[in-house]
Amino acid sequence: MKDRIGEIVNAIPVSEVFADVGCDHGYVAKEMLRRGKCRFAVASDISPKCLEKAKRLLKKEIDYGRATCVVSDGFDGLYNVDTALIAGMGGEEIISILKGAEELPENLVLQPMKNCDKVRKFAVSAGYRIISDYVFESDDKFYNLMVLKKGEDLLTEEEAEFGRTNLISPSEDFRKMLIKEAEKLTAYAENSSEEKKKKLLKKAERLLKYAENRRIF
Ligand SMILES: C[S@@+](CC[C@H](N)C(=O)[O-])C[C@H]1O[C@@H](n2cnc3c(N)ncnc32)[C@H](O)[C@@H]1O
């Protein structure tokens, strides 16, 4: 089992100026600096109350001129950022933040809680290519983590749905997530009408095919 923050920090590229947009507690910025993965960290949040937590956590780093905390809606007022993280929000919220940015950073790391397919499609249409895009498990929950860099890419419907890395080299966590999803659908099917039951079982069977890497090309 992995810890979510640690797994996110592992995935973030080494950066000059790193921004955690919607940082809440500020753990990621703290860990990025502790590991020497960025020269300067910006912890930002739309909520002044949330940002207070980050300010307390990052006090030493702020005093040493290595970090700053900014109340901000998305990328408003964030400058010279080369890498940004947006984690723990819904996909539509993430897309709205990206759409509202005057300038987007070279590297983006995204961890949407839902609507991952929409996020993938938007990111590619906004001029990012996928470096990695995979699922990991932490505390019995499954998270999608996307590492993106400015560039051109072409996404298939299947990649948008499942995440490219999961398709190329399915991890144990990805398989586990699909099996759990399929089990949920099967349980739900048991109490459904015949027509719905058929659909749900077909969906579950499809997920199991991916879990067993038996997808049809
Ligand atoms: C569920 S928390 C996730 C915190 C952290 N990123 C994580 O993954 O653990 C979402 C945070 O995003 C902040 N937030 C929501 N919309 C935002 C926006 N438009 N700009 C900046 N922060 C935002 C919220 O105030 C909240 O602190």
Image (cartoon, rainbow, N blue to C red):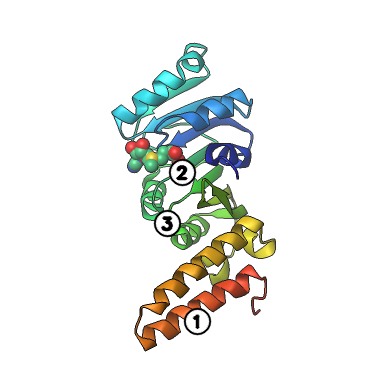
Q: Position of residue 78 (x, y in %)?
A: 42, 32
In the image shown, does 38 or 217 lie closer to the viewer?
A: 217
Left or right: 138, with 44 as reference point: right
Residue at 53 percent across and 19 percent down: it is 66
- Label 1 sits on a secondary structure element that is helix
Q: Residue at x 53, y 41 (%)?
A: 4
Residue of label 3: 114
Q: Quadrant of residue 3?
A: top right
Regarding residue 39, the answer to whether it shows in the image is no
Ligand 1 rendered quadrant? top left
* Mark 1: amino acid: Lys
The crowd level at tag 1 (other Cα within 10 Å; few <14, some 14-19, many 20+) is some
Residue labelled with disc 2: 87
User: Sequence order check: which comes first, mark 1 or mark 3?
Assistant: 3
Question: Looking at the image, which is closer to me, 188 or 141?
Answer: 188
Circle 3/circle 2 CB separation < 8 Å: no
Find residue 162 and report its horizontal and vertical position in percent. Answer: 55, 64
Mark 2 C-beta to ligand 1 under 8 Å: yes
Q: CA distance from mark 1 to mark 2?
A: 32 Å
> Looking at the rendering, which quadrant does residue 46 occupy?
top left
Q: Secondary structure at mark 2?
A: strand
Q: How much space separates mark 3 and mark 2, taking CA atoms?
A: 11 Å
SS for callout 3 = loop
- Left or right, residue 50 beside residue 2: left
**Between marks 1 and 3, how big is the CA–CA gap?**
22 Å
Q: Earlier in the sequence, mark 3 or mark 2?
A: 2
